[in-house]
Image (spheres, rainbow, N blue to C red):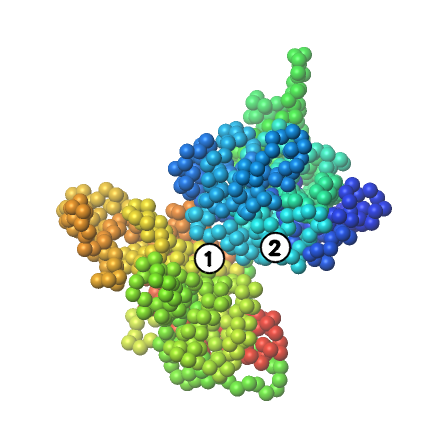
Amino acid sequence: MVIPRLRDASALRDATAKLTKTLDAAVAGTINAGWPVENVSFSIGLVTRDQGDPGVPLWEYHHLAKRNVNGTKRIGRDSQYLIGSVTKVLSDYILLNSGLDINAPVTKYISRLRDSESGIHWENTAEANDANSSVDGFSEYYYLKEVFLSAGFPPLKDSDYPSCGVIALNKACSEKQFIDGMIHSYPVIAPGERPAYSSTAFTVFIMAIEEATGKNYGQLIEETFGKALQMKSTRPSPGDDKKAVIPPDENSWGSDYGVNAPGGGLVSTVSDLSRFAYAILTRSTALTPAQVRMWLKPVDYTGGYSAVGAPWEIFRPHNLTPAHPHPVTIYAKSGGAQSYRSQFSIIDEYGVGVVLLTAGPMKAIPVLNDAIMAAIVPAVDDASRQQAAKGYARTFKTASGEQSNTTAAVDATFEMDKDSLTVKAMNRNGSDIYGALTQIWNYTMAQYTADMSSTVRLFPTDLDEAAVLDGKKVTREVWRLWPDFVGPPKSDLPGSGTLQDDCVLWTLGDWVHYGGEPVDRVLFYKDRKGDVVGFEAPFLRFSKHSTGVRTAHPALASPNPAMAGGRKSKPAAPARPATTLVLDNGAYTLKAGFVRDGGAPSEPRLAPNCIARDRARKIYVASDLDKCRDFGEIQFRRPVEKGFVVNWEAQKEVWDHELFDDKAPLKCDPAETRLILAEPPNGLPALQTNCDQVVFEEYGFASYYRGVGPAFNAYHDVQALFRTPTDEATVAGAPAEILLLVDSGYSHTTVTPLLRGQPLHSAVRRLDVGGKLLTNYLARLISVRHFDVRNETYIVNEMKEAACYVSADFKSDLERTWKGTRGDRRQDYLSGAGIVKDYVLPDFHSRSKGELREYDPARHSKARKVAAAGSHADEDILTLRNERFAVPELIFNPSDMGMRQPGLADLIYQSLQELPLGLWPGLLANIVVVGGNTLFDGFVQRLQREVVQRFPDDCVVRVARPPDPIISTWTGAANMASHANIDKVAVTKQEYEELGAAAVARKFATGINVP
């Protein structure tokens, strides 16, 4: 099925217009709606892959019931509803994105279940089983007590009910109460026996994630959806009464679901769920496209014609496209709370989703959902067929001038029949390739299946990639040819043909090859507008264009020749600040210092960019941390996450302490100071706007420039790094001509190609491995192998910096630490040729810092004897073996801990693949590495060796590290601050006030390319 472009599809436009009129008539009462329209409010959103804004559906409809007197008075896409069990889809996404082993028993993460005497075999219940359970957590209907009594049930006291979680009787359960209740629950079915609908299952696996991450469900929702997908109105109930759609009947709005929230306790909006559906359809979630496709798969079947996913309710109706009957797969999740009902549907084959939210009597949803599907699905099916016919149903021929090159005249013709795109003809030098294929398939496959018919269909595989055709960037689509069966042989036996609807054509893909090429694999090429411009049949060594197809290298935008400035708002410009504050606001360390007019940059001041609290609950802000004497179990709050400032209150507290308070080490007056601030590449516009507002509106700086941190490194004498350094560092008068900057810091590692100081944004690549992840990984290894140090972040970080190194030969070092070095003297054998080290832990009494020592077996023997005697050793010692090099190895091989990202050398290769070949030599010969992780011994040598292996032999690869890679970005920015043209690129406070934040963004976008 061709996924259609629906924004301008006339078939869909007509269908939605007709549906709008029908709904208008229903709510007006001119036709029978099937539900009390005066009591039911509802919102509908149709989501498509090509809608302009992820949060704005392509079509939407909203109705506010007359009897709705509470909550919002203006219903729209941002109005909040309780979404009930649609919550399960979001909770399951959190599980898939958590990194937990979903096939591990739940007892691995929730120890109380492991140690219990429960009737449920929790050790046989995996996280994935919980996610696929789609018996309910809200099983006590206390408000129907009188109904039970009138029906003859024995009377109960309130104390006979559970002590928590009973709506209208008591409060939500605490985590302990919930676990106790689960331990004493009856199992419903054996694990894996059949699907069972469960809300408590989602509470269980979310509790496991909370245990593993230290974050509660609300924080997980905010991090996963609020920040990553901009779903700002999605949160655990209760929601915002001012935005809420509150029905007039008894309802659950404002309820606190407590631990039951993961199974059905979220509030959301059409806009937020549109963003989520859009991310699923466009494969732009944090999951890989393959993970999303696997998520949209059934895991069990019901007693009818539907299937169950994780936690999808999957239905394949045949009657939605009456003009072209075929099954349409709907991945849906319904939800309900008292007087609320919701439906979230994904029809992936057409690239559409439907969000339907209602408040009021709950019988409206089936009627509305039927009406929407009956109107929308035939329209998008028609649009898909029309666009497939227009784009693909045509003849492709070898051009006359190309035949001499290919030595063959080839043509291929495709057409639409009632079911799909088919092959009408395919010839090469007059030979009927199309007929030959049918013969070959009958020779090779018919003996195992049925005879092949003369109909050959084409199906896309979703294996799209960038390419270049005739010098233009295109998208290459991979399609497969599938023959039809003639049908089963005739027979007089009973039941002949009973199972003929069983589709086994899917087994025939990639069955026959010719010269290494599958004979069922063909390629189409689309331009940027989505029009088909080429065809290729690799097994015939034929393409529409004789020049062939090569890998794409997207065109490089020409750098700006000079610093551009915004227009002046007044003839008289403000006075030029005489002092510049240069600030590299790192996630781990803040680097700040002044540059005075006509003077050399001062040395930067380094301070921890954090607020810390020790176990005595004393607070330390930034450089106050130097006064701390006990770092055991110290807790940190860092304003910067993943490279971006996400907590401005904490960040302002750090800045005030270091820069603006009366006793600040670097006291400055913002009104008379220019600020140069470094930011990571490809910053989020919303976060950049927040930053600009803080700079001008909170602090009132006279002038301001926000630049990409890696680009500041071009303002060094880069070539001096590759030569013998001079006694005095040389300052670059202009940015380096070409540079490949690798920045491996606390949050992440980035690769940024620079041309004349300008970052080439399309080729910037990011690896989510930084100092924080390495420290946490080392803590995890030590906690598994020795004792729990997960709360000792500071100590483990110091251990990492003192002991870790980058291995030149990971496999060899691993074998040495495992097997020793047989044949060497005993000391070298035991220590793995010196790799194994002892680390003496600080006790914060006699020893405030840890110490790395050579491995001493005698010391360990003595310690064991002391412990056996019931005494305590004078020193606590950890023996570090392969942890020393396994931790930094994640930078080069993140797959070692299950991350689906390329290593650093591959990241560089991917970056250069986006650039013209002409830039490769200059970039490879000028690789500069900065950031704290580059201080690991062996980092530069390992990177150079791996990069050399990935590029042609005639490419010279040079990798250099500045003398102090931690302050390199700051120093480059300080050099740039002295340039005569800095005022042309900086924005004044006056410009900001008169032209607004948008003008600031445009001016900064010109970059720092100073002549």
Q: Relative to residue 747, is residue 140 depicted above or below? A: above
Q: Residue at x 40, y 77 (%)?
A: 664
- Residue 103 percent across, percent down from the top left: 45, 38
Q: Nearer the viewer, residue 250 or 784?
A: 250
| Residue 766: mark | 1
Can you say which quadrant of the picture contains the N terminus?
top right
- Residue 801 percent across, percent down from the top left: 31, 59
Q: Residues within 10 Å of mark 2 (few under 14, many from 20)?
A: many
Q: Is residue 943 left or right of residue 516?
A: left
The residue beneath circle 2 is: 239
Q: Nearer the viewer, residue 303 or 953?
A: 303
What is the secondary structure assignment of the residue under circle 1? strand
Q: Amino acid at mark 1?
A: Arg
| Residue 218: mark | none
Q: Residues within 10 Å of mark 1 (few under 14, many from 20)?
A: many
Instruction: Please identify, in this view, whether the residue under mark 1 or under mark 2 is nearer the observer.
Output: 2
Q: Residue furthest top?
A: 492
Q: Relative to residue 559, is residue 537 depicted above or below? A: above
Q: Is residue 774 left or right of residue 436?
A: left
Q: Residue furthest right?
A: 30
- Residue 771 percent across, percent down from the top left: 38, 58
The answer to whether one can see residue 876 in this image is yes
Q: How many marks?
A: 2
Residue 434, quarter of picture? top right
N-terminal of the pair, mark 1 or mark 2, is 2
Q: Nearer the viewer, residue 973 or 141?
A: 141
Q: Amino acid at mark 2?
A: Gly
What is the secondary structure assignment of the residue under circle 2? loop
